[in-house]
């Protein structure tokens, strides 16, 4: 009976709601603010206001343009122009001079003075060297004195002869003696002049082979002299071109030792004989620089003998030419599209090539970036400063609008400690 009563009481206590005690109230009070804070933190903040729709659309359009430009193949272009171009025969050779001599003294003696050194430009008749000439000068003075004495004697005899006071035989004898004295004087004067070595023509001293104090003779080389205003280049042309090469044809002379410079020349002489061993004939091309010694003999040069000229040809830079399977092509650009065209070539020179047909002046051809390029490819020219399109200067700058920071969640105040 007692056991049954305890079971009923225990069942009734489990079914009743919990009673509110002071300790339980304090715990509920602590939990309520915390739940409210959690709910407020979980609630999303309202979106901040964005930029105007027009600015956003402009920025999107600019970005699309930028991406489109990046996807295009960057190339460099050059315009097709009209200009003169020539056909020529090209050769390599060295420059020579028409006049080059070695100078030797015409008398024997010791070198007393040098008047010229290597590299000096001299005129015809300028003294180059003087040999000690004391003996030669004395011989010349002696012969001059004898000649002058005989000249005075003959003048008196001639006067007497005119007055018929001297016979004809005595007159002729004194005239013969005077002529001999004059010849001895002229010979002695000539020998004395040999003591000074002089330049035979205008030119440049290229070598000096003696020193002051050295003894020289008639076979001693003292100087080498060249004439720099008559520089030539001798080339050997294949015989099949004999009919198209003519005297006075223009020529162009260049040298790798003088970059970015060219010199005008002309065909000076043509040998009419073809060498049976080489099958070539010799052509002498004259060339002249702007100043002496600018084109020294021995300089390695390239010579182009111009055989024909077209004054108004359609010119394409050689950098634009693409070689495929023995054919030549160029890429033209229009509306950012590359078009591959076959090149029908005419005359060529080191910089340009003539387009006979199919390409008009004013077209833009690709000179850089055409390697591996396909016909119809999208390209963009990088000739200008910028390679990617930029926004116009008058377009307003679009600044991002910062979002409003979320309100901080309130911190729950600590609940007072409850009593148990």
Image (cartoon, helix red, strand yellow):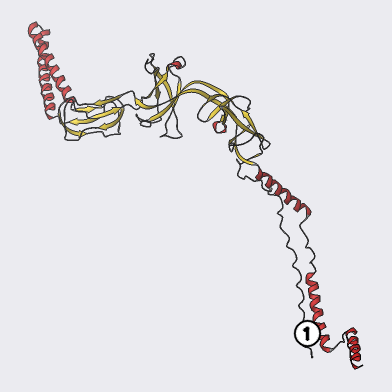
Tell me residue 195's x, y (percent): 18, 27
Tell me residue 378's x, y (percent): 66, 38
Q: Quadrant of residue 23?
A: bottom right
Instruction: Note whether 17 is above or below 59 in the view shown.
Output: below
> Who is closer to the viewer here, 262 or 344?
344
Instruction: Note whether 220 is above or below 16 in the view shown.
Output: above
Q: Quadrant of the C terminus?
A: bottom right
In this view, the residue farthest toward the front is: 1
Tell me residue 386's x, y (percent): 62, 45
Instruction: Note whether 267 is above or below 66 in the view shown.
Output: above
Position of 339 with respect to 32 (left or right) is left
Residue 212 in sight: yes
- Disc 1 crowd rating (10 Å Cα; few below 14, some 14-19, many 20+) is few
For label 1, the residue is 415
> Who is closer to the viewer here, 26 or 109?
26
Q: Quadrant of residue 140?
A: top left
Q: Quadrant of residue 99?
A: top left
Residue 166 in sight: no
> Who is closer to the viewer here, 217 or 189?
217
Q: Quadrant of the N terminus?
A: bottom right
Label 1 residue SS: loop
Residue found 78% across the figure and 61% down from its top:
49
> Who is closer to the viewer here, 387 or 261?
387
In this view, the residue farthest toward the bottom is: 2
């Amino acid at each position: 009976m007692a056991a049954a009563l305890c079971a009923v009481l225990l069942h009734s206590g489990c079914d009743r709601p919990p009673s509110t005690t002071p300790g339980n109230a304090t715990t509920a009070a602590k939990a309520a603010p915390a739940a409210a804070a959690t709910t407020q933190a979980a609630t999303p903040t309202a979106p901040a206001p964005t930029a105007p729709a027009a600015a956003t659309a402009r920025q999107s359009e600019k970005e699309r343009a930028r991406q489109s430009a990046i996807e295009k193949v960057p190339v460099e272009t050059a315009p097709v122009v009209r200009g003169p171009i020539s056909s020529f025969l090209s050769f390599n050779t060295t420059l020579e001079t028409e006049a080059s001599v070695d100078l030797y003294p015409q008398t024997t003696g010791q070198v007393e003075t040098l008047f010229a050194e290597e590299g000096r430009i001299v005129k015809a008749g300028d003294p180059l060297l003087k040999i000690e000439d004391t003996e030669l000068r004395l011989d010349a003075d002696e012969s001059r004195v004898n000649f002058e004495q005989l000249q005075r004697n003959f003048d008196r005899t001639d006067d007497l002869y005119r007055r018929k006071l001297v016979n004809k035989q005595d007159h002729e004898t004194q005239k013969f003696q005077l002529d001999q004295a004059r010849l001895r004087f002229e010979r002695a004067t000539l020998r004395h002049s040999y003591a000074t070595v002089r330049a035979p023509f205008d030119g440049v001293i290229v070598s000096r082979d003696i020193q002051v104090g050295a003894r020289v003779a008639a076979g001693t080389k003292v100087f080498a002299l060249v004439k720099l205003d008559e520089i030539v280049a001798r080339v050997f042309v294949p015989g099949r071109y004999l009919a198209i090469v003519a005297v006075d044809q223009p020529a162009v002379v260049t040298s790798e030792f003088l970059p970015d410079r060219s010199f005008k020349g002309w065909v000076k002489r043509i040998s009419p004989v073809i060498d049976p061993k080489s099958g070539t004939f010799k052509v002498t091309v004259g060339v002249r620089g702007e100043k002496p010694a600018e084109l020294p003999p021995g300089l390695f040069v390239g010579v182009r003998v111009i055989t024909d000229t077209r004054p108004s040809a359609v010119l394409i830079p050689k950098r634009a030419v693409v070689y495929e399977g023995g054919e030549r092509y160029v890429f033209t650009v229009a509306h950012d599209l590359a078009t591959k065209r076959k090149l029908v070539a005419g005359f060529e020179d080191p910089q340009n090539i003539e387009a006979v047909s199919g390409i008009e002046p004013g077209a833009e051809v690709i000179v850089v970036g055409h390697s591996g390029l396909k016909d119809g490819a999208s390209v963009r020219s990088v000739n200008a400063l910028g390679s990617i399109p930029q926004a116009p200067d008058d377009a307003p700058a679009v600044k991002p609008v910062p979002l409003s920071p979320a309100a901080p969640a309130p911190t729950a105040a600590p609940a007072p400690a409850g009593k148990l």
